[in-house]
Each structure stands twice: as C-alpha cells, then as structure tokens.
Amino acid sequence: MTTDTTTERRCDAVVVGAGFAGLYMLHRLRGLGLSARVFEAGGGVGGTWYWNRYPGARCDVESMEYSYQFSDELQQEWRWSERYSPQSEILAYLNHVADRFDLRPDIQFDTRVDEAHYDEATARWAVRTSDGARWSARFVVMATGCLSSTNMPDIKGRNSFGGGMYHTGKWPHEGVDFAGKRVAVIGTGSSAIQSIPLIAEEASQLFVFQRTPNFSVPAANRPLTDDEIGRVKSRYGELRRIAATMGFGFNTRSGETSALEVSEEERLAEYEERWKMGGLPFLGAYNDLILDQRANDTAADFVRAKIQEIVRDPAVAEKLTPRSILGCKRLCADSGYYETFNRPDVALVDVNESPIEEITPTGLRAGGIDYEVDAIVFATGFDAMTGALLAVDIRGKGGLSLRKKWEAGPRTYLGVATAGFPNLFMITGPGSPSVLTNMVPSIEQHVNWISDCLTYMAGRESRRIEANVDAEDAWVSHVNEVASASLYPGCNSWYLGANVPGKPRVFMPYLGFPEYVVKADEVARNGYEGFSLER
Ligand code: FAD
Ligand code: NAP
C-alpha cells in the first residue's frame, strides 16, 4: 500500500505507541466517541513485551497484579500460567486484548511518529510519520513507554565485530541459538540477571562483563494453581483496591515497623522468610528500608551474606557483592543468577578492574585481554523515561522544542503534561510514579485521568488545556523533595539518568503511588487546578 503524503488526514487524537498504555488509551478514546489513530514503530502490539524477547524475559510483579483491571470480564477470563508469566504469555495477553476490544483497525504498525508540531492558530497538532503521512489532531497522547529507547554504549570498534550482536530490548523474533557458542553479556541489570542463567545453559562459554554488581533476590517463580487463581478472582476488585493503597501500587506485603525497631534475630527471620517467598516484596519487609541508610544496611547485609553463601569462589562472590544501597537501583528477581557463577564455563569480568577497551572482529578486549566470542549480548538498558519522548521532534507554543525545554532535565506537571505544549499528554511521564510502581495500574490511572479530563473539556466546550508554569515548577520541586527524603538519589541509577553519558541528572519518577493519586484526583476535582483551559 502506498501512503498519500500530500493530503493531511484528521482525527481527534493521535496516540503514539501500542503497549499497555496505547491500547487502553485507544479503548477509552473510542468510548468517549473520539476518533483516534495509534502509531506503533513495532510490527505488532505489546510494546515492552513485543521487543524484549530475550531468554528468561518475564515480569517481576506477579502476573495476577501485572495486568489490566479496567474490564472485570477480561481479568476473570484470562488465565495466567505462572506467578511471573513469561514474555510470550504477556504478549499473547496483549494480543488478546487488542482482539477482544477490536483495537487493530485504528492501529498502524511499523510506523514511527517523527514529528508533532503545535499550531496555535488552529489549536491542533500537525503530526508527521515515518511513512511520510501528515495527520492533524486536536490531542496527542505519548504512550511511548518509559523503557523503550534502548541504550547501546558507543564502544570503540563496535561495528567491526564479525559475530552476532544483540540488545536485550530489541531481541530477534526468531530467537538466537547460543548452543555451542562463546558468548559475552555486557551488563548486570534485570535483563542480564534474567537471561544469564539461560544463556549459560546453552553456550559453551559465557563471559559476563559487569560494571556495577546488582542486588537480586530469588523470584521463586512457579506455576499458578487453579485454587490460588480462584482465590484471587473471587475478590479481584478488593485486592486491586488494597494494592492501590501500597506505596509501589502492588502488594509488597508491607511491614509496618522500622527495621531498627526489632531484634536482629527477628529481622533475620523476616528476611529469610521473604527470601524464600521470593520477589520484590523483600523490599517491603520494613517501612524504612528505602528511607533510612541504617535500616537499608540490615537488608543489604542479609543479601550480601546470601551471595557469599551461594557463590563458591570467594573472589567471584566478592565481585558480585554490591556495596551500594539495596533497592536504589531496581531490585532484581532471578532464577538461579548467582548459582550460574559456580559453573566452570561462566566467567565474570569486572570492567572496573578491566575496562572494555574495544570490540574487535573476534570479540572484546578488556584490561589488555582478548575475549574471543561468537556473540555479544548488550543487556545495557534504556535511555529511560525521556528517551522515547525526546526522540520525537515535539514543538509546542512559539515553536518551542521539548528537547530544548528539557535540556537540563524533564519538567512536567504531574508527569502527564508540560507547560508550553497544550493538548499534549504523556502516559507515565517523568514526574509520575510510573517505574517505581506496578506499571499497569499506573498506566490505567493516567489513561483514566486523561479520559476524564477530555470529558470535562467537552462538557465546557474547551478546545485547549495547558499546564501552568507555576504549577509545574511546584510539582518538579515536590518530586525532588520527596525523592531527597529517600535513599533513591544515592546511586548511579537510570531513575537519575546516570546510565546514559551526558544525560542530565534528575530523579525522574515520583515516589508514592497513593499520594500521587490523591493529588491527581484533587487537581481534577478542582476543575483541573494548575492547568489553563480555553474555549
Ligand atoms: P511500552 O510497552 O514501552 O510501549 C511503548 C511503545 O511505543 C513501544 O512499542 C514503542 O515501539 C512505541 N514507540 C515509542 N516511540 C514511538 C514513536 N516515536 N513512534 C511510534 N511508536 C513509538 N513493569 C512492571 O511494572 N512490572 C514488570 O514486571 C516489568 N517488567 C519489565 C520487563 C522488561 C524486560 C522491561 C524492559 C520493562 C518491564 N517493565 C515492568 C516496565 C514496562 O515497560 C511497563 O510495565 C509497560 O509494559 C510499559 O507499557 P507502555 O505501553 O507504557 O510502554
Ligand atoms: P539496566 O538495569 O539499566 O541495566 C543495564 C546494565 O548494563 C547495568 O548493569 C549497567 O551498569 C550496564 N551497562 C550500561 N552501559 C554499560 C557500559 N557502557 N559498559 C558496561 N556496562 C554497562 O537495564 P535492564 O537490565 O534492561 O533493566 C532496565 C529496567 O527494565 C529494570 O530496572 C526494570 O525496571 C525493567 N526490567 C524488568 C525486568 C523484570 O524482571 N521484569 C527485566 C528486565 C528489565 P551500571 O549499573 O553500572 O550502569
């Protein structure tokens, strides 16, 4: 099919991205009687779960919670097979959602939005897509994902490598056969920690290049039984409401006391129980683990001792042991990660001692040693939260570009809008709880909020909404203030942009899902306080 690049096509809303956020946004826009067009760079729906097909990819928030709640029929009819379901099943679920709500007719795949320029005279956005088409829309909703723009380190000689090169966030659909191959994995974040045990099983030799060791707890993944699924489904609504009162928006089985208020014996027993139970609720053992350094030390020391216990070679164990704050970078949940380093065919290379000097046609040179490999896996993460937004040439009032406005770091009001860019919404944008939560409820909360806002505008015949600068300034200060009262700013995490060279260091997500929801609801109740609406 050829694209008509001369005619401008019109719709009420352009939505960019067809992951969890874009799909639900489209469903709601249709429900409001608005015409919408979704553009998706990938060849199918799913977003994160379309792109991240690396071995071992699965969620780390339990599937029965990491799923939509907007339709009770949907949550009742879908059956998750595992406590943390694999990528293929989450992708199948999102395809099911697209079919069940007949979303595909309004989604254009393999098409990137390159440009969105606001025209003040008409109060419409002019959108240009990679197929050369031009669209005019009253609203633009960026559902581009917090973790969708891959971070590929610019290592000297990268293009000279003769073997296979893969990024976990852009994994080939046909899979990769590592059988009998020598493989290098760069990075030890969540993606690496999930994939390394499985790659090690296949490869003849695996070299793991580690810059910073990460804390990981066992996922304790397992199949779900009909009984436990039935128990959740019989009170799904109630469980969802309880989860929404939790700081991270999911059930972390939050402890109500300080780690420092209990005896060491009691504390160790609690950590041991949570270690066995598995998963991110480890961080919920006490209410101050991410707020108080001394409390954090108690949990961090527990995990450090576990690493030393599991990994047989003391020198390797020491290198794998993080000396940073537990949970400051996202806590990882693994299936046999530390155990993998007991294999004779797995070697850990600490790039602090042996910096990666270059990629050669036959492998990597680090610390003067040549590591000959057949494949290199970049598990090097993402230009998180702002990468995908700034990849689009977005221009607001007076031709102001978003890239220019955010030069020193993102500035938003509630993480959903930014001053100077009327009728532009972001789903889980910087300044919203987003990546510090179970993202599906955070996405739904944003989509619902935006939908209510559009309904309000229609009722008042407003054609334009824009965040006010003073409300935005106050919100940015508040986001920073809340973060500063926690331990989060204390390490080089991607929450701070520290993983991407040259990126401004700003703590991007908002800490505290329930508090955020109260504030967002209050803003709406007060007639969209902090926004200007115009007819
Ligand atoms: P995405 O799923 O990232 O979708 C955004 C889509 O927008 C992408 O498909 C992209 O191609 C498209 N896009 C971007 N820019 C453009 C453009 N200019 N033009 C056209 N299309 C564009 N969160 C959790 O809460 N729990 C988990 O267990 C969890 N596990 C994760 C595991 C992995 C491996 C990763 C990478 C992330 C994980 N996350 C998890 C975070 C995850 O990203 C979110 O939970 C959620 O899937 C985000 O959905 P989204 O629709 O907002 O964005
Ligand atoms: P990540 O957490 O940012 O990890 C990237 C890793 O690559 C880090 O170890 C980083 O080291 C390393 N790295 C980056 N650039 C490097 C370089 N130039 N040289 C050497 N090492 C380099 O990315 P991710 O593992 O893809 O995870 C990103 C986020 O996605 C997670 O935090 C989580 O939110 C989500 N996710 C979740 C799951 C899950 O369990 N469900 C799985 C995957 C991803 P430094 O630490 O030193 O920067």
Image (tube, grey):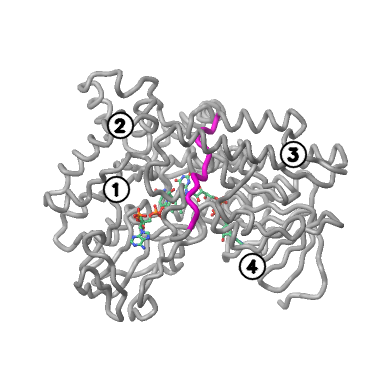
Question: Does dot 3 land on a helix, a strand or a loop?
Answer: strand
* Among numbered discs 4 and 1, the one appearing first in the sequence: 4
Element assignment for label 1: loop
Q: Tell me the kind of residue under disc 3.
A: Phe
Magenta stretch holds residue 504: yes
- Per the rendered image, the range of residues in magenta is 503-514
How far separated are the C-alphas under marks 4 and 1? 36 Å
Mark closer to the observer (3, 2): 3
Q: Quadrant of residue 298?
A: top left
CB of mark 3 within 8 Å of CB of mark 2?
Answer: no
Q: Viewer-nearest of labels 3 and 4?
A: 3
Disc number at residue 302?
none
C-alpha separation, residue under disc 1 versus residue under disc 2: 15 Å
Q: Residues within 10 Å of mark 1 (few under 14, many from 20)?
A: many
Q: Which residue is mark 2?
A: 274
Which residue corresponds to mark 3? 531
Residue plotted at (31% across, 28% down): 295
Q: In which quadrant is the N terminus drawn?
A: bottom right
Q: Which residue is mark 1?
A: 335
